[in-house]
Amino acid sequence: MSTMNAALVTSFDEPPHYRTFTAPVPHGDEAVVEMVAVGLHPRVRSGASGSHYTSTGVLPLVPGVDGVGRRRDGALVYFVTDDDQQGTMAERAVVDPRRSIVLPEGTDAVAVAAAMNPAMSSWVALRRRVPLVPGQSVLVLGATGNAGTMAVQVARLLGAGRIVGAGRDRARLDALHGVGADEVVALTDDVEATRHRLARAASEVDVVLDYLWGQPTEHAIPALLRAREDRNRPLDWVQIGAVAGADIQLPSAALRSANLRLLGSGQGSVSPQGYLAELPSLVAAIGSGDIAVRTRTVALRDIEAAWVAGDEPGVRTVVVP
């Protein structure tokens, strides 16, 4: 039985440790790749803490949900793991060809590893869940996080006519103008003032990409609906993240008094085949610079320190074996 070095989660209350672990064994059409770059995404952290809705609670586990690896023939591939597989923060990982694509020669593996997961959330939402019609307007709720900032870029790239970004980090909020936002709204502890600003800026949007949920969404939905000129016009509210809380309280009247359509976008709501179909165009957008990402790399052996240190705002950590 061969072994390899990996980030290993042995307790949901501790960061991963750099350990020797059993090397993966491929089955059927699967292949083993040498890992090149793995993004340390919030999704990876939630999986390693056992809090993600796909978590099985089984330990030990190797974290990591995607990455860039090198096949035996030298080709670089981007791939996503299946839920029942060990993760990608290791020297080697198993690739299912149905969940991978070959990257073009010259692709920046670190940029792809950093950007694919956060950018995919909005890309798939606006291509598969609520296909964006060119010219439609979009509100990104939680636009100052990494995925939210990329969502502004994605919405612009996919043809949004007007984009409003809402978030709490003032500096990052102001920077959204440089990546495609037409207007920004500061989310503050003054609930009434925030409701007023959101209603003024975003009551007429067609699509909301919601990375926050929780109380911000509880306040935002009624504020936008009350100010909407034509409540019969559809408002598609796409729940993607839950940074501000896993639950909301929504008055039933909100669903009866307006054409509000609530839906989610994530694992389960979009098939693996649906995700795979979107990968080539998203890789091309990242490679061309249309979707920009700032990165820092850390060595796999330093995973525990990098995990505890957290991410610099606006910068995505990428682990390299």
Image: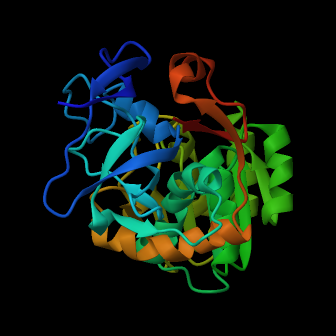
Farthest front residue in view: 73
Farthest bottom residue in view: 134
Q: Is residue 43 left or right of residue 32?
A: right
Instruction: Say whether residue 144 is visible.
Output: yes
Q: Is residue 2 left or right of residue 236?
A: left
Residue 239 lies, with reference to residue 100, above or below; the image says above
Picture quarter containing residue 79? bottom left
All told, the count of numbered labels is: 0
Q: Residue at left 75%, top 61%?
A: 201
Q: Position of residue 58 (x, y in %)?
A: 19, 27
Q: Residue at left 25%, top 47%?
A: 83
Q: How is the image coloured?
A: rainbow
Q: Residue at left 82%, top 39%?
A: 170
Q: Position of residue 288 (x, y in %)?
A: 71, 72
Q: Position of residue 271 (x, y in %)?
A: 28, 67
Q: Quadrant of the N terminus?
A: top left
Residue 140 lies, with reference to residue 295, above or below; the image says below
Of residues 267 and 225, the one drawn nearer to the viewer in this rendering: 267
Instruction: Say whether residue 222 is visible.
Output: no
Residue 123 lies, with reference to residue 108, above or below; the image says below
Q: Is residue 228 left or right of residue 251?
A: right
Q: Position of residue 294 (x, y in %)?
A: 74, 47
Q: Is residue 222 left or right of residue 259?
A: right
Q: Residue at left 59%, top 49%?
A: 114
Of residues 263 and 189, the one drawn nearer to the viewer in this rendering: 263
